[in-house]
Structure formats: C-alpha cells, structure tokens
C-alpha cells in the first residue's frame, strides 16, 4: 500500500469520535504498562518504551497522560498481568492478516479472534503462516499540509537521522526505518518541529492483494471491524490494498 493509502486510512481513523480516541489511549496505556514492567520506566534505557512513547505522541496522547501512564506502571508493576500474543491467518481470497494482542486471558482472546475471522469468512492459521510476507519496519507518515519543510530537506533530515527510505506521495511523506533506528528518526523529526500523523514500528507487506468481489470486501471489512472492537487487540496488520 502506498503512503497515500496509508495516510488516507490514518486520517479516517483519527476523524472518528472521542470514544475511538479513548480506546486508542487505553491500548497505548496497556502497551506502556507492559513495556515498563519488562524494561523499567526510564525511556532512554528502554527501547520498547521509547518506541511506544513516539507512537503515543503521534496519536496526540498528551505528554502528561504519557508520564502518568509510565509512573502508574512503575508503581503497579506487580499488577500488570498482560501478556503479548500474536495470531496469523487469512481473510477472503487469501488476504494475509496478523493480529497482535495484549491479554490477561488467552483463552478469551483466542476465541474472540477466531470468531472474528470466522464471521468474515476467514480462518486463523499456524504461527508463521503469513508473517514471512511482511517486513518489520519503523514507519512515519507526515501530512504535506502540516509540513513546512520541502521534500528534499525533509528527506535529507530523515536519511541523516538513519532512515532507510523516503517516499513522497500526493498528500503525504512516508519515512521507513529499521526498527532499531526508529526512535532516533522520530526524535530528529520532533526536534525539527515536524508533525507526524503516524509513527510506529509496524509490519509492512511485501506484496498487496486486492478484493473485487463485493461479498469478499464486506467479509474483510467485517473481520477488521470485529478485531477493532476487541479490547485485547492492540494492532492488526494486513496486505489488503483497500
């Protein structure tokens, strides 16, 4: 999917109501809690926490909310009982889907995710069945309208900070990094006053699939909607070019 399509999807999600934003903040808070439990509350010494904080800022999570989440997690470390689980499977016409979740009840989560796939005419597969079709990368999306830098200057800023690739789309810029370089590139953007619409370590498909049958499109949308409604689900990756 081009940066343009990614940008359009992000804009659409961010224009949803405050309840949706509240759900995003809840999910980010849960990610922060797990990261703090695993690596401590010091952002500079906890790379996973650092990446999540960058993602939280790109989602307009206020700094004081981020700080409170970190302090709360540091104080309640023994009460954080979420664990990371990942599921892989197929949607209609073989569309590849990866679901990452944080759960305190793996049986409940597994049942809910299988239900979402089944209702959308898909199926959960074995671990590794589709993840080989994705590359783990840092991805930063910038709205052209909110960016005062011209494309060449922004590209040099990104590459100098350690980015792997830079792409200019119709209404956005896309910056790709290795996971280990993601935080450094985010910090460079932040220091330069660049507003990031999205910033996260994500799974980028190597190839994209299209759906032309109306029934398949409805089924795929059904899967994604059900997964989005599940409080345990943190992130969904797929190779459907919507």
Image (spheres, rainbow, N blue to C red):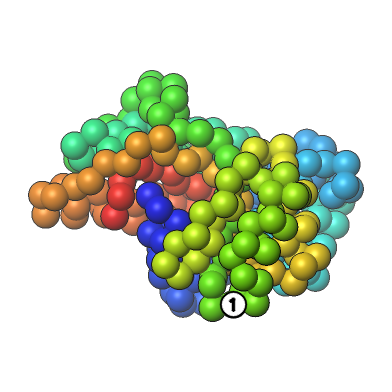
Q: Position of residue 81 (x, y in %)?
A: 68, 39
Give the vertical position of 5 relative to 238 (above or below).
Answer: below
- The quarter of the image holding the C terminus is bottom left
Q: Is residue 181 visible?
A: yes
Instruction: Write down the residue under mark 1.
Output: 146
Residue 46 left/right relative to 137:
right
Q: Quadrant of residue 93?
A: top left
Q: Secondary structure at mark 1?
A: helix
- The crowd level at tag 1 (other Cα within 10 Å; few <14, some 14-19, many 20+) is few
79 sits left or right of 110 in the view: right
The location of residue 104, given as percent across then percent down, is 59, 40
In this orientation, which residue lies closer to the viewer: 113 or 111?
A: 113
Horizontal relation, residue 190 to residue 43: left or right: left
Residue in the foreground of this view, choosing between 131 and 111: 131
| Identity of the residue furthest to the front in this view | 152
How far from the left and from the top, in percent, is residue 109? 46, 39
Residue 77 point in image, percent of width and height = 81, 44
Give the residue at x 29% y 34%.
90
């Amino acid at each position: 999917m081009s940066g343009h399509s990614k940008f359009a999807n992000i804009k659409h999600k961010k224009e949803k109501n405050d309840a949706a934003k509240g759900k995003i903040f809840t999910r980010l808070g849960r990610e922060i809690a797990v990261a703090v439990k695993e690596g401590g509350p010091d952002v500079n010494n906890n790379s996973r926490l650092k990446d999540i904080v960058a993602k939280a800022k790109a989602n307009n999570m206020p700094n004081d909310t981020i700080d409170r989440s970190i302090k709360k997690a540091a104080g309640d470390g023994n009460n954080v009982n979420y664990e990371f689980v990942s599921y892989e499977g197929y949607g209609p016409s073989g569309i590849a889907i990866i679901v990452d979740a944080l759960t305190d009840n793996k049986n409940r989560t597994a049942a809910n995710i299988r239900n979402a796939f089944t209702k959308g005419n898909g199926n959960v597969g074995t671990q590794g069945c589709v993840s080989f079709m994705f590359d783990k990368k840092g991805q930063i999306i910038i709205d052209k309208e909110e960016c005062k830098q011209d494309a060449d200057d922004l590209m040099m800023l990104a590459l100098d900070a350690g980015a792997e690739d830079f792409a200019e789309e119709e209404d956005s810029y896309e910056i790709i990094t290795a996971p280990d370089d993601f935080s450094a590139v985010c910090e460079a953007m932040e220091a330069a006053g660049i507003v990031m619409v999205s910033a996260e370590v994500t799974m980028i498909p190597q190839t994209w699939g299209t759906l032309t049958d109306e029934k398949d499109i409805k089924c795929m949308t059904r899967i994604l909607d059900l997964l989005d409604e599940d409080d345990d689900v943190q992130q969904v990756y797929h190779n459907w070019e919507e």
